[in-house]
């Protein structure tokens, strides 16, 4: 009996040591190594006064909504760590501690006071054991959207209209959105999202049920803004377009565009734009009055000098119109300069 109790006690002792780490043993569970990451956030500089410009002669009656918050996500597979911080003078600091080592993706979104995502960006980083990682995220303006309404009541026999086709960019006629008209609806509405912030030439065509053209509009200048919705109403009874705009962060507008004729072609000169990361200019040309503006050249910025471009492709006997826009390193494009028209003899 005594021997049987000694054997049972020995077996319990071995089981305790092997499974639970009794008497000073180490647990068998694996301990994950962790590190930290610190993310410094600095919002873009405030736009200069001239950047808040009128579009098609409509003066905006608003103030720039300030950037209020930063949303930061740290992701690895389906694991997501999130923080939201308040921006102080456009800056904030976010730290994630005790993060499991490995590759992570950092996503940063800057939110303005109206709750819109104005800027966003992401990057990859590596968390190492007992170290504080650094992440550099390039923030770019968020895509904007267009809220479109087309009032058909001003079109004669508008009942035959079955579809509205929106041409979103005169530089890319394949960039189209088709909007079907519901029976009995006189105002066709649609929202187009995912538009890069810049100035577009847009137009619409009204098609009947056979796809034949019932009406087409003129090309209209429309400004798409980062993280904002631009509202456009086509009202054919009045022949106008009303546009509601908000703030943007492009380079400043090129000014004082002037043309001149030379033996080599049409010489365009303009005053340089001001922006810390300005890289160049887009030259737009159209054959008036039947075309929308199209990019005919991209000109590198020459700091501190008179900016110019020579259009050697102009044909004799044709009337051309030109505008110029400035482009920065992130691809943001300014509103257009003044328009000039040249008759080529």
Image (spheres, helix red, strand yellow):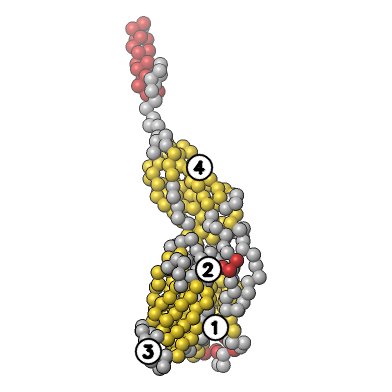
The Cα–Cα distance between marks 2 and 4, rounded to whole angstroms, is 35 Å
Q: Position of residue 279 (x, y in %)?
A: 43, 65
Residue 2 versus residue 77: which sits nearer the camera? 77
> Dot 1 corresponds to which residue?
183
The Cα–Cα distance between marks 3 and 2, rounded to whole angstroms, is 31 Å
Position of 51 compared to 310: left or right? right
C-beta proximity under 8 Å, tags 1 and 3: no
Circle 1 or circle 3, nearest the eye: 3
SS class of the residue under badge 3?
A: loop
Q: Position of residue 262 (x, y in %)?
A: 40, 85
Circle 1 or circle 2, nearest the eye: 2
Instruction: Examine the rendering and report whether any part of residue 193 can be seen.
Output: no
SS class of the residue under badge 4?
A: strand
The Cα–Cα distance between marks 1 and 2, rounded to whole angstroms, is 46 Å
> Dot 4 corresponds to which residue?
95
> Dot 2 corresponds to which residue?
252
The Cα–Cα distance between marks 1 and 3, rounded to whole angstroms, is 48 Å
Within 10 Å of the Cα at label 3, are there few (<14), some (14-19), or many (20+) other Cα atoms?
Answer: some
C-beta proximity under 8 Å, tags 2 and 4: no
């Amino acid at each position: 009996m005594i021997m049987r109790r000694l054997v049972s006690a020995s077996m319990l002792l071995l089981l305790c040591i092997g499974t639970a780490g009794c008497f000073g043993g180490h647990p068998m569970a694996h301990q994950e190594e962790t590190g930290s990451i610190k993310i410094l956030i600095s919002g873009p500089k405030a736009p200069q006064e001239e950047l808040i410009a009128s579009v098609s002669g409509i003066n905006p009656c608003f103030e720039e909504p300030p950037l209020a918050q930063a949303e930061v996500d740290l992701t690895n597979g389906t694991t997501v760590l999130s923080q939201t911080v308040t921006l102080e003078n456009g800056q904030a600091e976010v730290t994630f501690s005790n993060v499991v080592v490995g590759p992570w993706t950092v996503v940063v979104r800057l939110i303005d006071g109206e709750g819109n995502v104005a800027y966003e960006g992401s990057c990859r980083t590596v968390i190492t054991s007992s170290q504080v990682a650094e992440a550099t995220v390039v923030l770019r303006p968020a895509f904007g959207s267009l809220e479109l309404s087309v009032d058909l009541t001003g079109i004669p026999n508008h009942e035959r209209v079955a579809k509205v086709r929106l041409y979103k960019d005169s530089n890319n006629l394949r960039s189209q959105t088709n909007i079907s008209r519901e029976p009995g609806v006189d105002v066709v509405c649609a929202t187009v999202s995912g538009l890069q912030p810049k100035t577009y030439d847009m137009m619409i065509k009204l098609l009947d049920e056979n796809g034949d053209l019932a009406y087409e509009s003129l090309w209209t200048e429309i400004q798409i803004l980062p993280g904002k919705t631009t509202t456009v109403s086509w009202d054919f009874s009045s022949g106008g377009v009303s546009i509601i705009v908000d703030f943007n962060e492009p380079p400043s507008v090129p000014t004082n565009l002037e043309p001149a004729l030379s033996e080599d072609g049409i010489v365009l000169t303009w005053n340089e734009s001001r922006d810390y990361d300005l890289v160049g200019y887009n030259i737009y040309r159209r054959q008036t009055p039947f075309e929308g503006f199209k990019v005919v050249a991209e000109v590198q910025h020459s700091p501190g000098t008179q900016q110019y471009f020579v259009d050697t492709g102009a044909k004799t006997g044709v009337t051309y119109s030109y505008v110029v826009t400035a482009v920065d390193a992130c691809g943001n494009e300014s509103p257009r300069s003044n328009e000039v028209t040249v008759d080529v003899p």
